[in-house]
Amino acid sequence: MADPEGPKRPEAPHEAPVRERGVATQTRPRVQRPPRFKVLLYNDDYTPMEFVVALLEQVFGKSPAAATELMLLIHRSGMAVAGVFVLEVAETKVATVHNLAEQRGYPLRAGVERE
Ligand code: TYC
């Protein structure tokens, strides 16, 4: 019966085994990771706390507990990172924050910063 894998390369009995020369080095395959960008949310004196919590849940996928904690961090420290994304997504998040805040007449500001 024929070999289903087809003909094999014939042995070469006179070839010396190939040995690596030089210093052994190890290389990692270089994968290109896209740069990532932080979306920063800034405190102000007018945007209601509940609005910021709801926005952190809806726009940034935070749990109610995480959103409340993050809102309080921003309220107390002035600013915090709401999430980290590739640039296009980060810019869309910022635009969404500004649009939602503007619709309600709140001065809430967000910005993007390279990680
Ligand atoms: N400082 C606001 C207030 O006391 C609450 C607030 C929190 C506003 C976070 C913006 O990013 C913000 N109502």
Image: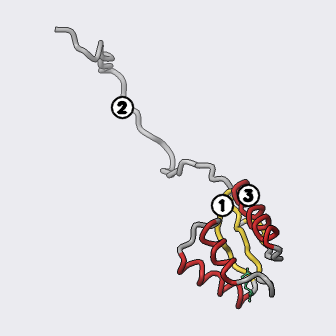
| Residue 50 pos. (x, y %) | 66, 81
Kind of residue at badge 3: Thr
Q: Nearer the viewer, residue 35 or 9?
A: 35
| Residue 8 pos. (x, y %) | 30, 16
Q: Is residue 110 left or right of residue 54?
A: right
Specify whether tag 2 is near ligand 1 (CB below 8 Å).
no
Residue under pointer 2: 17
Residue under pointer 3: 92
- Circle 3 SS class: helix
Quarter of image, res 13: top left
Q: CA distance from mark 3 to mark 2?
A: 58 Å
**Mark 2 burial class by Cα count in 10 Å: few <14, some 14-19, many 20+:** few
The quarter of the picture where the N terminus appears is top left
Residue under pointer 1: 85
- Is tag 1's residue or tag 2's residue first in the polypeptide sequence? 2
| Residue 34 pos. (x, y %) | 66, 53
Q: CA distance from mark 1 to mark 3?
A: 10 Å
Q: Is residue 51 left or right of residue 1?
A: right
Residue drawn at the location 77% of the way across and 81% of the way down: 47
From the viewer's perspective, is residue 23 above or below residue 97? above
Q: Nearer the viewer, mark 1 or mark 2?
A: 1
